[in-house]
Image: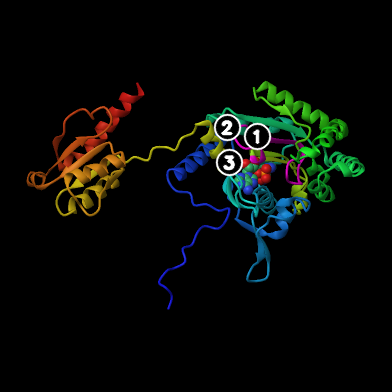
């Protein structure tokens, strides 16, 4: 026999439950994003949460996301599958599979999994919102995409977000730059930190990401990507910067911005928040990934997009004191001083009429039920006792809004819905003035 104590389960490390009011804030964030991108002609795409492992391998064999952090396993039928670590790979796979008309402009919101070392702002399960566009080479599209993300941060009231932009050049420029960096770092290997020497073996570009103080001098004097850019990549980047200036998006050119995924070509960018710890201050990032469609077995197709980290954005909003959780108050609270029949039936008919209504289960005194009504933030209380039942009425008590200083009054049961609607309209007009 056990001692009667059951094991109490907890969410897995790096994974969190999101409860109200935080859950309401996340939903509002996604809804706001959906409205913002709809204005620019993006439609929603919902790719599966799992794909064949190889789909994600196309993201790049040299990235930590693929080599170290993937949740991959064998399906019951022996297929190697993985939980998605990001959405771009799945979206491009969907493009190749369905061949929609280009330009294909899509947005998404969804959960991703990366087996990282969890800390504040870095989780094993996290949400992103983002966009992808396939089939357009024009640098003005880069401007559109970057400006969308920039505008979204501003719409949330975030003021401490900086935009970093860079160009990694065409495929061959990037390859030449990678070779140049490898040569340079190998020649100066003794001055590199041990961790960076390891990174160098896998991906010389990522050494530039090192934040270790001992690597700083070497990184500062490393070859610069601009010296490796072809004329066409240079022209593309110049037009992007000109466009950002023209639409009023402030940026910093960051030659050492390489990003964590292998598929980037030409324009890359990242949004960092100065209100977060430097180790995970990226609230979003993206860039061009011309070549990913081919890697998935599709036609050569240009692509660009970004993903913004919902969890980190909300942390940054907390520290900036902006984008508070929306109020979740009900309109009506029904107080039943009899056997609960009226609370049951009235809440039902109010909700059917589209008016939010709440009640307390288990009855209780007028005082205790009024307390519950206060806590619910309800605008109006409807009180039903023996007296009200006798003349088919309810006592109507305004709790908030323009009538809250008025006294309570009796209203006929039949006119409840109409009366509440009328008062809600008066209140809206009153507050909109
Ligand atoms: P990423 O830079 O890997 O890019 O992720 C984008 C954002 O997701 C990051 O800036 C960060 O805010 C958030 N994020 C990433 N990992 C975590 C984590 N472990 N915990 C919390 N938040 C995290 C991509 O995912 C690319 N697919 C972006 C893209 C779209 N590029 C082109 N199109």
Q: Nearer the viewer, mark 2 or mark 3?
A: 3
Question: Which residue position is annotated with label 3?
Answer: 312
| Region of the chain picked out in magenta, as a range | 258-280
Q: Is residue 5 left or right of residue 245?
A: left
Disc 2 or 1, which lies upstream in sequence? 2
Task: Identify the residue position indicated by label 2 in the image.
Answer: 153
Query: Can you tell which of label 1 and label 3 is closer to the viewer?
Result: 3
Estimate how packed mark 1 is, as few (under 14), some (14 to 19) or many (20 or more) residues with alpha carbons within 10 Å.
many
Q: Quadrant of residue 218?
A: top right
- Left/right placement of residue 3 relative to residue 196 reads left
User: Helix, strand or loop at disc 1?
Assistant: strand
Residue 161 placement (x, y as % from top left): 61, 30
User: Split into 4 quadrants, where in the image is the C terminus?
Assistant: top left
Q: Total number of numbered labels?
A: 3
173, 22: nearer the viewer: 22
| Position in image of residue 271 (x %, y %) | 65, 34
Q: Which residue is disc 1 drawn over? A: 271
Q: Is mark 1 within 8 Å of ligand 1?
A: yes
- Is residue 195 among the parts visible in the rendering? yes
Looking at the image, tell me whether mark 2 or mark 3 is earlier in sequence order: 2
Q: Earlier in the sequence, mark 1 or mark 3?
A: 1
Q: Quadrant of residue 229?
A: top right
Instruction: Provide residue 386's location: percent of width, then percent of height.
Output: 9, 48
């Amino acid at each position: 026999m056990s001692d009667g104590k059951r094991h109490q389960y907890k969410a897995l490390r790096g994974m969190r439950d999101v409860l109200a009011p935080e859950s309401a804030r996340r939903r509002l964030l996604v809804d706001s994003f959906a409205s913002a991108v709809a204005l620019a002609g993006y439609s929603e795409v919902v790719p599966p949460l799992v794909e064949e492992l190889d789909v994600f391998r196309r993201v790049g064999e040299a990235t930590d996301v693929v080599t170290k952090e993937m949740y991959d396993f064998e399906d019951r039928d022996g297929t190697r599958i993985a939980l998605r670590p990001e959405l771009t790979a799945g979206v491009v796979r969907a493009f190749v599979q369905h061949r929609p008309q280009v330009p294909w402009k899509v947005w998404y919101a969804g959960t991703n999994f990366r087996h990282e070392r969890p800390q504040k702002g870095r989780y094993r399960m996290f949400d992103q919102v983002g966009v992808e566009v396939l089939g357009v080479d024009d640098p003005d599209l880069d401007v559109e995409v970057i400006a969308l993300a920039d505008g979204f941060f501003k719409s949330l009231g975030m003021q401490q977000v900086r935009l970093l932009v860079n160009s990694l050049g065409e495929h061959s420029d990037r390859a030449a730059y990678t070779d140049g960096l490898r040569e340079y770092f190998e020649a100066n290997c003794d001055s590199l930190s041990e961790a960076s020497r390891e990174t160098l073996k896998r991906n010389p570009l990522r050494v530039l990401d090192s934040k270790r103080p001992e690597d700083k001098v070497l990184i500062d004097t490393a070859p610069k990507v601009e010296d490796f850019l072809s004329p066409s990549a240079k022209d593309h980047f110049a037009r992007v910067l000109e466009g950002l200036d023209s639409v009023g998006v402030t940026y910093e050119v960051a030659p050492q911005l390489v990003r964590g995924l292998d598929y980037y070509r030409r324009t890359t960018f990242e949004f960092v928040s100065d209100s977060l710890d430097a180790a995970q201050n990226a609230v979003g990032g993206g860039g061009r990934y011309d070549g990913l469609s081919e890697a998935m077995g599709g036609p050569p197709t240009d692509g660009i997009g970004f993903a913004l980290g919902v969890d980190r954005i909300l942390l940054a909003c907390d520290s900036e004191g902006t984008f508070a959780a929306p109020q979740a108050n009900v309109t009506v609270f029904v107080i039943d001083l009899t056997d609960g029949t009226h609370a049951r039936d009235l809440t039902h008919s109010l909700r059917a009429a589209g008016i939010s209504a709440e009640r307390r289960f288990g009855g209780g005194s007028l005082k205790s039920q009024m307390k519950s009504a206060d806590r619910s933030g309800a605008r109006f209380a409807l009180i039903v006792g023996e007296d009200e039942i006798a003349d088919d009425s309810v006592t109507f008590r305004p709790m908030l809004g323009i009538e809250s200083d008025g006294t309570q009054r009796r209203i006929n049961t039949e006119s409840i819905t109409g009366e509440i609607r009328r008062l809600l309209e008066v209140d809206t007009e009153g507050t909109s003035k």
